[in-house]
């Protein structure tokens, strides 16, 4: 983060928490606002486990978004940590973006979010996502229904996946931000190091290629990252909780782990603009989602 913290007249800056139920499309929205992929995406809930800062810098100012894990009822120690991460993001921000799936009905998860946001007293923008999946005739009644549920500063319907109306989210946010310094260099889009991004990309490919409980039972840690002139060597370990899961993640004759590696390597090469040599191992760490030592190793505690 920048050290001089000079405030230029008319330069706006501030922190925005992005919250919502799992699978509402928070990461997809943020990638659209950033104009590039920084956050991993999946159609499975609870893809995001950490709070990740994403930075948009324009001539009018700088917005630091805090992408949070989806607010859900935790089932294990990792889930408890994820919930605390999401709620903690509200303690140091200027504005809240509540991302809701326009195709989902109001539920207890939404009521919990409303309670938490109301208690914070922060200005809140509702982003109604996935409106491309709705019949246009139901959109206005839906906006009316949401506006009766909570006192939103604004409601913006979008399709994050198609990047439809997402620029309006940015335009709306500037109205709620104070004058402030440039917290990060203007070319930075995230505060996370390359090791973290590499681990997340590997985990995204596991989410995409496996089913049922497997994606949630996999944790990824990059144990080595060595940069050479035209090559980056990355060594990563995938933790699973049972031997049966290890067999599934490796696949017949190593087919699944090879495909995870191929897809992750291609994306990393595009991101890092270098050749990547990616080596993956799968290890069993029983009940790791409830183990403090492994959660710390994976950066979750």
Image: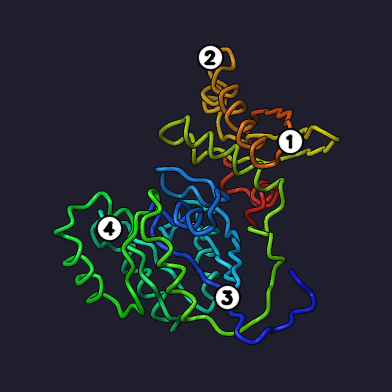
- Whole-percent x and y of residue 174? 49, 77
Tell me what residue is drawn at x 35 percent, y 73 percent. Answer: 114
What is the C-alpha distance between the residues marked 2 and 4? 40 Å
The residue carrying mark 3 is 60
- SS state under label 4: loop
The residue carrying mark 2 is 252
Task: State the quadrant of the N terminus.
Answer: bottom right
Tell me what residue is drawn at x 46 percent, y 50 percent. Answer: 46
The residue carrying mark 1 is 274
How many other residues sit within 10 Å of disc 3, few (<14), some (14-19) or many (≥20)?
few
Q: Are marks 1 and 4 in contact (CB under 8 Å)?
A: no
Q: Are marks 2 and 4 in contact (CB under 8 Å)?
A: no
Which label sits on residue 102?
A: 4
Q: Quadrant of residue 241?
A: top right
In this rendered view, identify the residue nearer to me: 8 or 78. 8
In this rendered view, identify the residue nearer to me: 69 or 197. 197
């Amino acid at each position: 983060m920048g050290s001089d913290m000079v405030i230029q007249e008319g330069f706006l800056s501030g922190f925005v928490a992005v919250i919502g139920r799992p699978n509402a499309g928070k990461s997809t929205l943020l990638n659209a606002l950033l104009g590039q992929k920084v956050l991993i995406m999946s159609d499975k809930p609870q893809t995001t486990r950490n709070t990740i800062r994403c930075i948009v810098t324009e001539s009018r100012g700088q917005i630091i978004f805090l992408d949070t894990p989806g607010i859900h009822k935790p089932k294990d120690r990792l889930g408890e940590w994820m919930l605390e991460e999401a709620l903690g993001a509200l303690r140091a921000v200027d504005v809240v973006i509540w991302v809701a799936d326009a195709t989902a009905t109001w539920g207890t998860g939404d009521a919990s979010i409303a309670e938490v946001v109301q208690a914070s007293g922060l200005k809140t923008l509702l982003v109604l996502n996935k409106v491309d999946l709705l019949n246009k005739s139901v959109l206005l009644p839906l906006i009316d229904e949401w506006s009766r549920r909570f006192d939103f500063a604004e409601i913006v319907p979008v399709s994050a996946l198609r990047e439809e109306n997402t620029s309006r989210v940015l335009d709306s946010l500037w109205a709620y931000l104070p004058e402030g310094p440039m917290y990060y260099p203007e070319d930075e889009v995230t505060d996370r190091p390359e090791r973290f991004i590499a681990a997340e990309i590997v985990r995204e490919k596991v989410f995409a290629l496996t089913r049922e409980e497997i994606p949630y039972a996999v944790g990824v840690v990059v144990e080595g990252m060595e940069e050479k002139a035209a090559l980056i060597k990355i060594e990563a370990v995938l933790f699973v909780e049972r031997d049966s899961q290890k067999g599934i993640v490796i696949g017949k004759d190593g087919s699944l782990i090879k495909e995870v590696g191929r897809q992750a390597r291609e994306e990393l090469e595009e991101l890092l603009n270098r050749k990547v040599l990616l080596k993956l191992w799968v290890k069993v760490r029983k009940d790791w989602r409830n183990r403090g030592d492994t959660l710390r190793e994976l950066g979750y505690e």
